[in-house]
Amino acid sequence: MNVAQNIVAGLDRILTMELVRVTERAAVAAARLRGRGDEKAADQVAVDAMRQELNRLAIKGTVVIGEGERDEAPMLYIGEEVGTGKGPAVDIALDPLEGTTICAKNLPNALAVIAIAEKGSLLFAPDVYMDKIAIGPGYAEGVINLDASPAENIASLARAKGVAVSDITTCILDRPRHAKLIDAVRATGAAIRLIGDGDVAGVIHTTDPDETGIDIYLGTGGAPEGVLAAAALRCTGGQMQGRLILDTPEKVARAAKMGISDPKRIYHAEDMARGDVLFAATGVTDGNMLAGVKFGGTYITTHTIVLRSSSRTVREIKARHQDLDKF
Ligand code: VTB
Ligand code: MG
Ligand code: MG
């Protein structure tokens, strides 16, 4: 097969497989520091490892969602060029360790995450909060609405799913700012899974409620994490809406600099991640969908999910790494 045939639509599909190594490497590095109570150290090794592996890819990549602005993040900063430079121009959203605190505490669902899209097709989101709502695939458009109340959204989802409201499980970040939201959901009779961190995983979990037990994600979390989750949902199917929380003139100005002219806009998953999108996540700690890294005597095992939007392929890759010197 020649290169032209391999590019079915959008991005070269070989990149899907290449991405696995990138998140695997970051996850293994972070997992070595799992449960050590040092989130910064775990984050740093994940960033180093992801960057090293990313720079081996035959792409001309630009980090658009990364570790922060250039002056605050020495590596994988927004605007950093990554890859060998010989290959397609792509935009990259990444979080080498999504859930630094959960990794430090060795709690469920810490992930190494990356998404790649065609140049110019990922939302250039400032590092502010985003109000989010997400459900999995199989529902008609319009079942959820960010502007509707939690009770309305939960009732609408229960109706669409053909179950009672009390059979619905929501996922919400355990934060004081969510006190009202939590009360409103409790008043409906639906269940809540409160998570300490990791709302990329929280959103993705809605795509497989039978396995994860989560039907709907609600609440505010990081905007960069919102774009990453949207990239995953574009591949698995499902619906997501997000709105940046630009509640100070400074934030509005910062967003405007990044090209966001309507501060109140509701973004759907396909507005945050357009065109052909590839996504990979490797489990760092054991989670509802992905197992964490396991260190055996002679090999290391990793569990990764790799997604591609143009084919809607969902692959799970369990890898046994025997060349331990590499890690
Ligand atoms: C969430 C969570 C992330 O940031 O996006 C959160 O999913 C939002 O910020 O894992 P707060 O912690 O201030 O609520 C993380 O916790 C870290 O990236
Ligand atoms: Mg990070
Ligand atoms: Mg994060």
Image (cartoon, rainbow, N blue to C red):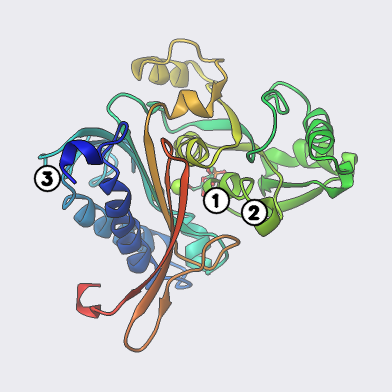
Label 1 CB, ligand 1: below 8 Å? yes
Which residue is under mark 2? 195
What kind of element bears circle 2? strand
Give the residue displayed 40% in from the left and 45% down from the top: 279
Give the residue displayed 88% in from the left and 47% down from the top: 166
The one of 169 and 197 positioned closer to us in this rendering: 169
Task: Give the residue type at disc 3.
Answer: Thr
Which residue is under mark 1? 201
Q: Nearer the viewer, mark 2 or mark 3?
A: 3
Q: Quadrant of residue 282?
A: bottom left
The one of 156 and 202 positioned closer to us in this rendering: 156
Residue 84, label in figure: 3
What kind of element bears circle 1? helix
The one of 323 and 275 positioned closer to us in this rendering: 275
* Distance from Cα at disc 1 to Cα at disc 2: 10 Å
Task: Give the residue type at disc 2.
Answer: Ile
